[in-house]
Amino acid sequence: MANCTIADVIEQYEGDLLSDWIRRQQESLAARRDLISEAELRTDSRNLLSVLRETVSRGGDLNVTHAEWAKARDMLGDLSRRRVVQGFTPSETATFVFSLKQPLFDRIVNASSNDPQAIADLMWSATLLLDSLGLYTVEFFQKSREQLITRQQQEMLELSTPVVELWNGILALPLIGTLDSNRTQVVMQNLLEAIVAKETVIAIIDITGVPTVDTLVAQHLLKTVAAARLMGAECLISGIRPQIAQTIIHLGVDLGGVTTKATLADAFQIAMRKLGLAVTKA
Amino acid sequence: MDRIPILRLGKFLLVTVQVDMHDRLALALQDDLTTEIVAHRARGVLIDISAVDVVDSFMGRMLANIAGMSRILDAETVVVGMQPSVAITLVELGLSLPGIRTALNVDRGMDLLRASQESEGPASDNRAIQ
């Protein structure tokens, strides 16, 4: 068979190819059968093979970044997104595409048995095509993972900055975890918005849960205090552990303009006194 | 050219900035305010910027200047109602306005001014006698 193309091979042997491919996938995923159902595997394989056949039979080149491959790209993107959620590793996801190689090569050899040059050419283009599809899958897998991580970071950011009203006019902001620029921005925003919403006079920033304080964190804290002051609220910093006090002094950070207290209780007491309130025994 | 109104409230002046402070408006305000302080012998200036949501370094410096001028004319300045985003911007610009007193809203600002007037009560009485 002269001038045989990948499209011809797929068209001629589609059913064969599909069953061989699925069998190979089942072998390689033998230990992971709990993650994906057989039906889903079968549907995915059938869909990809038919999209592949459609696209290559329309002629055009084998560059998967081109527009005619959009459908295949969408399919693979959707697939790797699902595999991320199902808990597959990147190589397992890529194997989905790569395991098509062996069946396809076998059929290529069958289809054009007399011409070694034609076989080599065909195999080369098939390899190129499947490699780029596989790489696209891995790339997309990675991207979906990154999106997942970013989303979780976002959720953590929102979870970890509660603003608590201790008394009428007194707010507490217990900080937990390392402070970076992003988080400080959120913390600052939350605190300032709460100050407006609750008509706060005094805000206490408690850093008991902050593991380390470096110059950057200290600077962020001072910025927050300055911003709160601009809005007309006073800021106290509490929960300074002994090691942190040492680090702050060793770093030469000047916390001079800010009232600092060792514990939240002390800071609360100061805040009450500033508001002219007192706690007495009943 | 439109101007920012300056209202007299007893011994204090109330300035409510309702529009975007462009540079020329700010300069006009500076002029008007100093004139008014002298004319009414005002002891305190309340600048309400709760409607301002965009500031730049010029505006920040303007506030600091107004506060400085008022102090020379023996009037205390309180800036009230600063929006969170404005506060963040000013801090990021490095303008934490150390010479200015601040309050959350006009009410609180008024309390602040009254309190500081009372604490120097005899001085203002003297002035009344003169």
Image: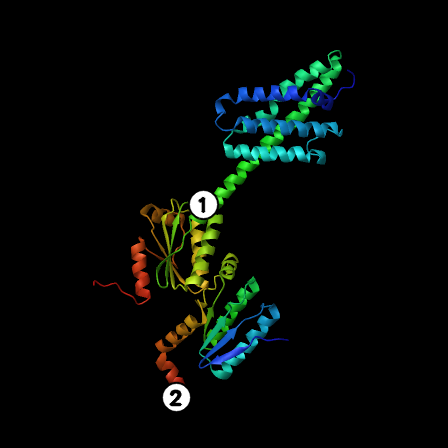
What residue is drawn where x is 68% and y is 17%? Answer: A107
Report which residue position mark 1 lands on: A156
Name the spot of residue A83 as percent of width and height, x first. 54, 32
Judge whether residue A62 can be spotted in this image: no
* Label 1 – label 2 distance at C-alpha: 64 Å
The residue sitting at 31% across, 61% down in the picture is: A270
- Letter of the chain that mark 2 sits on in the rendering: B
Residue positioned 59% across, 74% down in the render: B28
Choose top left, top right, bottom left or bottom right for residue A10: top right
Front residue of B4/A51: it is A51
Check disc 1 and give the amino acid type.
Met
The coloring applied to the image is rainbow
Q: Which residue is mark 2?
A: B129
Q: From the viewer's side, name the closer residue of A263 and A254.
A: A263
Nearer the viewer's eye, disc 1 or disc 2? 1
Looking at the rendered structure, which numbered label has been put on residue A145?
none
- What is the chain identity of the residue bearing mark 1? A
- Mark 2: secondary structure: helix
Give the residue at x 63% y 18%: A102
When the figure is inspected, residue A56 is found, relative to residue A262, above or below; the finding is: above
Kindly indicate the quadrant of the structure image that contains residue A77. top right
- From where the camera sits, is residue A248 visible? yes
Q: Is residue A242 left or right of residue B49?
A: left
